[in-house]
Structures are given as structure tokens and as C-alpha cells.
């Protein structure tokens, strides 16, 4: 039971490095923070670059799911550190991969349809 429901990113992102490349291209974070985050994630023994990127604007989760609890705790432990990227999607994608979670798909066709 994944304990998580999300949309995959619909902008053709091709993994963590590609997501960080887009963050830099669109000037969404400081280059040194992006580089520090990339260095950290690439140094992880279970790093794989070409994994799905998820949209974090809308997601559902089961707060009682042990898997979700561990995944989200490790995410926040890393994400809250100073000097790393403030963009959550690459790190979240890595943590979802690390914990072997396949988020359930939303029943709506897109995030725009969630509220209609």
C-alpha cells in the first residue's frame, strides 16, 4: 500500500538531473543550491537519474501509512537543511524511488480537473 496519490509531471521531465536543469533554466533557485543538491543526490548509493518526477501541488496521502511516514520524514530531514535547493520535486522524486513507492494515480485526468 503506497499511502500516496500524485500526478506525474506532464512537462516531459526526464528524471532528476533534467528537473534541476529546468529549475536553473527558469531561474527558480540559486545555481549553487542546485549544484549542492545534485551533488548530494548523485552521491546516494541508490541514485537513479531517470525516474518519474511528480507534481507536488496536489497530492493525497495516508498519514497512517508506515511507508509514507518514513518517506516523508527522510524527505523533510534533507529538504529542511540550509544551502540546498528549495525546489521540492527532484528530492521528492528521489525519496519516492528510494522507498519503492508507486503513487496511485488521481481519478481526475489532470490537476486542473481535481476541483471541477
Image: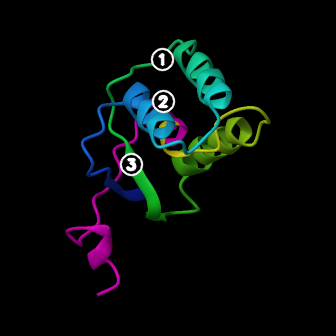
Q: Residue 40's spot in the image, x, y percent? A: 62, 19
Q: Is residue 87 or residue 94 the one in the foreground?
A: 87
Asked if the residue under mark 1 is in contact with the one under mark 2, i.e. CB atoms within 8 Å, the reply is yes
User: Residue 3 magenta-drawn?
Assistant: no
Which residue matches tag 2? 98
Asked if the residue under mark 2 is in contact with the one under mark 3, i.e. CB atoms within 8 Å, the reply is no
Residue 99 in sight: no
On residue 46, the disc is: 1
Name the residue furthest left: 109
Which residue matches tag 3? 54
Q: Residue at x 67, y 30 (%)?
A: 33
Q: Residues within 10 Å of mark 2 (few under 14, many from 20)?
A: some
Residue 69 in sight: yes
Name the secondary structure under disc 1.
loop
- Sequence-wise, the earlier of marks 2 and 1 is 1
The residue range painted magenta reads 91-116
The label nearer to you, 3 versus 2, is: 3
Q: CA distance from mark 3 to mark 2?
A: 14 Å
Q: Is residue 42 or residue 60 the one in the foreground?
A: 42
Q: Residue 83's spot in the image, x, y percent? A: 76, 32
Quadrant in which the C terminus appears: bottom left
Q: Is residue 38 or residue 96 the one in the foreground?
A: 38
Amino acid at each position: 500500500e503506497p499511502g500516496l496519490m500524485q500526478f506525474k509531471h506532464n512537462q516531459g521531465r526526464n528524471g532528476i538531473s533534467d528537473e534541476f536543469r529546468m529549475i536553473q533554466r527558469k531561474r527558480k533557485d540559486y545555481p549553487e543550491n542546485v549544484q549542492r543538491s545534485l551533488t548530494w543526490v548523485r552521491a546516494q548509493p541508490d541514485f537513479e537519474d531517470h525516474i518519474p518526477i511528480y507534481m507536488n501541488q496536489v497530492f493525497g496521502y495516508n498519514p497512517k501509512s508506515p511507508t509514507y511516514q518514513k518517506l516523508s520524514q527522510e524527505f523533510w530531514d534533507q529538504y529542511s537543511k540550509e544551502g540546498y535547493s528549495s525546489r521540492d520535486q527532484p528530492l521528492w522524486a528521489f525519496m519516492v524511488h528510494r522507498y519503492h513507492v508507486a503513487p496511485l494515480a488521481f481519478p481526475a485526468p489532470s490537476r486542473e480537473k481535481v476541483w471541477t
